[in-house]
Every structure is written in C-alpha cells, then in structure tokens.
Amino acid sequence: MKVVKFGGSSLANAAQVSKVVHIIQSDEQRRFVVVSAPGKRFAGDIKVTDLLIQYAQATINHQSTDTITGQIIARYEEIATAYHIDPVAFNQIKDTILALPNDDYQDRDYLMATFKAHGEKLNAVLIAQVLQSVGVNAKYLDPKDAGMVVTDSPNDAEIVPESYDRLSEWADSSLVRVIPGFFGYNAQGQICTFSRGGSDITGAIVARGVHADRYENFTDVDAIYAANPSVVSHPIAIHNMTFREMRELAYAGFSVFHDEALIPAIQGDIQVVVKNTNHPSERGTSITSQKRVNPAYPVSGIASSPNFCGIYIRKYMLDKKSYSQKILNILAEYGLTYEHMPSGIDDLTVIMHQDQLSADLEDTLIRELVIALRPDEIHITHDYALLMVVGEGMANRTGIMSKATDALARQNVKLVMVNQGASEISMMFGIQQDHADIAVQALYDTFFPDL
Amino acid sequence: MKVVKFGGSSLANAAQVSKVVHIIQSDEQRRFVVVSAPGKRFAGDIKVTDLLIQYAQATINHQSTDTITGQIIARYEEIATAYHIDPVAFNQIKDTILALPNDDYQDRDYLMATFKAHGEKLNAVLIAQVLQSVGVNAKYLDPKDAGMVVTDSPNDAEIVPESYDRLSEWADSSLVRVIPGFFGYNAQGQICTFSRGGSDITGAIVARGVHADRYENFTDVDAIYAANPSVVSHPIAIHNMTFREMRELAYAGFSVFHDEALIPAIQGDIQVVVKNTNHPSERGTSITSQKRVNPAYPVSGIASSPNFCGIYIRKYMLDKKSYSQKILNILAEYGLTYEHMPSGIDDLTVIMHQDQLSADLEDTLIRELVIALRPDEIHITHDYALLMVVGEGMANRTGIMSKATDALARQNVKLVMVNQGASEISMMFGIQQDHADIAVQALYDTFFPDL
C-alpha cells in the first residue's frame, strides 16, 4: 500500500487536479492521499498559503479582508466548478474561509497557524469530493481523527511519537483517505503547523504510521538531479539515492523534498519516491536506506548554498575547549545558530547563516566575542557559499578530494574552507558565493565526465 | 643585545661546554645566557633532569639515593674538573644536591619541582664559574633576584606579567648574566617549573623582559628543516619563518623550539634564531613576525604527528549547538581535551590525543556519549596521524590543496579528515598513522620539486 503526497503545483488548478485524479485512479495501492494547498498556476502567481497569511495579517490589523477572501475562494471554486461539485458542499468551504476570523485564538501565533492550515484542510475536503465525483471511494480524514498529535509550537510543531500507534489503526481502511498536509493538533486540540512546506512531513508521518510499502511524493520535476538544472544544463537524474545522501544534498540547497520529512521515512524505513505529477510514468528518484552496489559514479550530487558568513578568530595558544564553550554561550545568548566551527592550531572559524545577523547584531556579537576571548585577530567574512559533493560511492575511494580540488583550482575558485569528516560520503568547501555556479559546473564536469 | 639559550646537548659535557664558552666569547652582545641542565652525551645516556626525577622519587619512597646522587654529581664534576673550578666552590654544588631531601616541601609536587629545577640551577652556577675561569665577566643570576614570579602550579607554571617590568631593570647590566632555565618562584617563594623543556620559555621571557634585539636558541641542529630529516633525506632548511608558521609546525611535531616559548617572543616582537652549538657559523633559522616577500616555495614545512583518535558521532538532524555543548561537558567531566571537532551535516568527529584514553576510560566515555546524545551511530577510530602543510606563501594562492591531495592520492593515502580553515597558512589532513611517512615524503616531493 502506498501513501501519495501531491505538492502545491500539482493541485494549482482544475487541469492539474485532473492529473492527480488520474494518478490515484491508476493504482489502487494509492490509498492515502496527502495534499498541499493550491500552489502557483504560473510564474508570479500567489500560493493560497501566502494569501492565507495575508488574510491572517489583515485580520490581526483589523483591515478589510473582502478582496483577499475573494481571491482565496476563487482558487477553490475553479476546481469545484470543473468537477461539478454540489454548491451546498462548496458553500461549506466558502463559509469556513469567511468564518476564520470569528474563532477564539489563544494568541496571534495560533491564529496564524489556523489560517495557514486551512489551505491544506479545505483542499483535502475538496479533493475528496472531486474523487467521489469521478467514482473513487474517497473520504476526507482530518488529522485530529487520524490521531496526529503534535507539540505545542503553533508554527513549528513536531509530531508526538504516540501518534504513530493511532495512525496505524487506519492502515486497513479500504477507502481512499484524503488527508491535509502541513498540520496537526496539540494536546489542547489547537491547530499547529509544521515548518513551511511541511506537507512532505505529513506524508512521511502517515507513511510510517500506516506502514506503507512506499511513500510517493508527487511534485513538478521528473527526478532529483545531480546538480541544479538552472546552473548545469541537463544534469543527470539520480534514480537511486540513500537517505544520507538526500540529507546532505538537502542541506546545501536541494529543496525538492523537505528535510524534516526524511526522519519518519528513515525511522520507518519507508522507500520514498519523488515523482512528477506531469509525467507520472517517469522513474523519478527512489530514496532508501539501501546503498547502491557498484555505482556508475562515486559522486551522486553536487550542491551549493549561498549566504553564509565566517567569523575568524585567532589567538596564540588558545584553549579550544574553553574557547568553544564561551563562543557557544555567546551565540546562545543572542539566539544564533552556527553551522560549522572548523579549527586550526591557533584559530577557529564560526560559520553561520548570515541572514541571522543585522549590521547592529553583527557589531554587538563581535564586541562580545572580543571581550570574552581577547583574540589576537578577529574578522568576519560575508558571502560565502557552502559547496557540497555527496556520494555513498566516495567512501573507501582515494583521490576524490584530489579530483575535486583540482577541478576548482583550474577555474581559480579559491577555497576559504575545506571540511571532510569521517562520514566519507561528503566533502564540503567554503568558497566565495559569486564563484558558486562556476564551481558547481566544474565539479559536475569532473564527476560526470561522459555526459 | 642578545639573549642566548643553550639546550641540554650543548651542555652535556666539558667538550660541549667549551663550544658554548667560545660562542659567548665571540660576541659581546650575548649578555644573558640561559642554560638547560646537562643533557645526553650519547644515545642511551640519561639526562640530568631525568636523574633528578629518579632522585626525587627515591626520596619520596624513602629509598637509598647514594647511587643516583653519585651519578648526578659526576655529571657536574666532569665539567668543573675540566675548567679547574675551585673545589670549595664545587663542593657547594655537591652539598646542595645532597641536601635537597632536607628541605621542607609543601607536598610531593613542590618537592618534585625543586629537585628538577636544580638541574638548571646548579648548571647555571657552574657555567658562571666556568666563564669566570676563562676571563669572562660573568655572574649567576637567580630567577628570584631576576624577578621571575610564576603562577602557583608546581610543575606547569606560567610567568606572571609583572615579571617583565622587574626583568627590564637588568637590561643595562654590563656583566654576562647566567640564568637557569625552566623555573621561577611563586608568590610564596617556592620553586615552580614550566612544562618539560621549559628552558626555551625562560630564554624567551628574559629576552622580552630585557628588550633583547635577538633571542638565540642554541641547540644541536643547523636549522629547522622543511620536513623531519629522519623521514625525508636531506630536507631543505627553513632559514626564515614567521611565528605563525613555527606555531603550526610545532603543533604537529616540529619540536626544535618549545611551543610556549613563542608567546613571550611574539608579545615582545623579539627575533628568535635557532642555531647549532656545534656549527655556530651556520645561518640557522630566524623566526620573526615578518612575512617573506615572494617566497621561493609557497609551503614552508610539512609535519606529521601520530597517536590521535577520532570519535565519530552521527545523528539525523542533530542540533549542533546543544550537541557540542553536551560533548564539551562530558569531556570536561573526565578531564579530557580535544584537538578538533570537524562537523558534517548530521555528524561530527571529536579528534583527540589517544594517549589520554585508557581502554576503560574509552568505554566509559563512549557510554556517556551514547546516554547524552542518543546517536544513530558512534564509533572510535584509533591511530590517526595529523598531517600539516604550513606556509605563509599559501595564502591567496589557489591550487595548493589540489596539489597536496593529488600527491596523497597517487600514494593511495586515504584521507579520513581534511580541515582547512580561514587562516590560509595551513592545511590539515587526518590519515592512518602507518601512512604518515609516505605522506610526508610525497608532499615534500610535491612542494619542493627541484631539490
């Protein structure tokens, strides 16, 4: 039995929904359908989730909401009309949207969570009706009834482990269950959402809960590619990869599949298959715990992610342990997170996402570090990219680092950081971000030479 | 004016002492002479410091000390006899050795410190007499009179900053002052030593204190070499290097000049020159804060240091900050220090000196880490070497990493860690330690190709 999840672009309008209906009808194993809110129909379009955020903000600010509710309702209505959904049933969706401001909310965060979650919730209600209208024995399943209890964090919740037992009770259902992605309920019965894009997470949770054989994640690409197609033209598709590879690539910008959604899949050892709603016969990308035997290429993928900065700190005879502890304490004090802290003999570099730092906060942070550490030298460098070369096939092979650094040197890409730990399935380089595209292309040409 | 320091092998016997006398006589700028205890005269010989440690242990254990005191006295006597030192004066040295057990010591650590320090102390007394006997206007200067106050840590003391002011009062002395290395006095007037080999530290402290133009460190090599001469045959001498380069190379096993001794030199910006007592006309190695302009080779030196281990810890979606903090706390609990903690996306490796870990302690540590971190995977790998490639000339050049990793790959040296931070003057590789010599040779051949 399969859990299938459809992303926003797969449900953006009636034309896309017809593809989804066909995919569900074509395989009776697809018995749990997790849906996102309707996404963009064309470049520049606004996703329903973003419309709902505007709606929530207008409500909080006591501004007029007529225009925005009109836009939201129109998105659902277009689909309902195409499938001749009973106007009485559709009016319930419409009324629910209009009544959102009337509920009691504990605070603005809970209000925001509930408004956002209705993008998925109402879409699931509608898709269940659409499926019924074409003869599929489908029924809406609310996360509350499914037993999806989440932590009490309105806009960044996590699943509570006991939910899996409750979900497993639904495994034998003979109906097609349509479940909204992105949210669950806390112990008090309030809606709390996962992080943005969290429908992937719901799909993975349901797949683990009902012990699915496969979790199919339908989106708008034929596969996950070995490099970003907007940088490298026609990169090779990765048809098989491991969870670890996906996780490393996701970190550095491969955003096809939500990072956090890997965890339930790993925990339940559920095969994840990324497929294209528009070309459902394409193989897609299968992600499992199984390593490939004799992969054609040692490297699976090359990714880069911009907007990092590095705080370089040097002090003769620094005591790393007390130094690191002081740095961690100061970061914690300002709510900052760091990504890596490579150390030399008398220096270390704190690498972090630079969008955490305003100019003021940066000044304050440097000042605090100077007071606490009395360094001989301290400076911050902006606009790093982290470049990742990932592949299970790299383990136990020598010469991969040499090939990579040679390719970068030939393009005069300067390495400001090199980091390869004992995982052996990835190498990380810090480079200037305006070299990132050249670097990705050079590494791609090196590790996929015949293509 | 120069401060000169002579190591143990330069003062091992009368023949060596005559070279020291000649060096002092040949340059009237050499006005502060810091001496070690007599070292080894031949392979397999025992250093006086080690004899004194045996003497201290026998005293603590109430064992007979006649043989050991005889051996110690004989070492000084051979030098005294050669220079016809007044027997009355020499008897004071002898009596001091024999009377060491009679003093009151706060505890065994202070006893040990005082016994050890007398290797240098009595040698300085004797060398002052030797110099006088050949007509040099020399006088013993005790660290107490010099004003060298140190922290109250009997066998691992550090200089107290106020000492520099007191030392500066001796700068104008017209005599040659002979000062014992290795120790000072705490605020209570008790002897406390620096870490082993700490005569280099005394020399640097004196040089900074008296504002010397140069600190000459006489030892038994013609220069510091670009690689270990016992690994690479006839490596090139490094005639000029920076403090930073020396510090990085010292970390990975270049033991010619004591690590901690660099700090006073850096603070006082004193030129350090490492020279050979046996070939004083050789240029030696000059260490300063000045970077070389247009160095012939981008790399200055290649070092490797064995006996590291790496604890590899992997957990999906680990929170680096709390993870690192937990690890640091556990290490602190067991008094362990770590060297580096390179991190991947979902993993990190704690690299530390493995001689800190007994088999029992290793088991305990792993168990504590498992309890605190609940990792998906944890294992320890022993017998790493850290391989360092160091050179100021590497900064702002691309392709150095590529050359290095290519050279290692051609010798099938597997990289278990690669670490290059923002200092840009060094690269660090973790490799299996039985590959270390091959690796050093391969890197030497790559970066010094014409030699």
Image (tube, coloured by chain):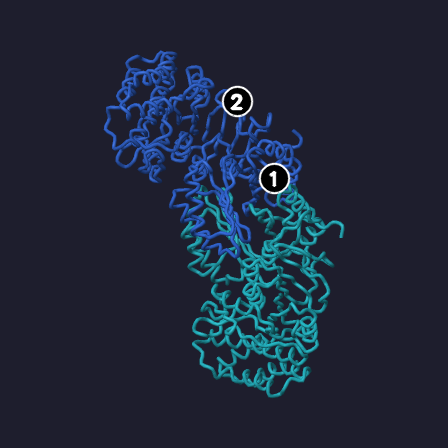
Chain colours: A blue, B cyan
**Mark 1, secondary structure of its residue:** loop
- Viewer-proximal residue, A351 or A425? A351
Mark sitting earlier along the chain (1/2) = 2
Dot 1, crowdedness within 10 Å: few (<14), some or many (≥20)? many
Label 2 sits on what residue type?
Ser
Label 1 sits on what residue type?
Lys
**Mark 2, secondary structure of its residue:** loop
Q: Is residue B379 visible?
A: no
Q: Is residue B436 visible?
A: yes
Q: Quadrant of the N terminus of chain A?
A: top left
Residue A414's label in the rendered image is: 1
- The chain carrying label 2 is A
- Viewer-proximal residue, A414 or A259? A414
Q: Position of residue B344 (x, y in %)?
A: 51, 44
Kindly indicate whether the residues beneath marks 1 and 2 are on one polypeptide chain: yes
Q: Quadrant of the C terminus of chain A?
A: top right
Residue B90's label in the rendered image is: none
* Residue ID for mark 2: A281
Q: Position of residue A314 (x, y in %)?
A: 52, 51
- The chain carrying label 1 is A
Q: Is residue A426 above or below residue A320?
A: above
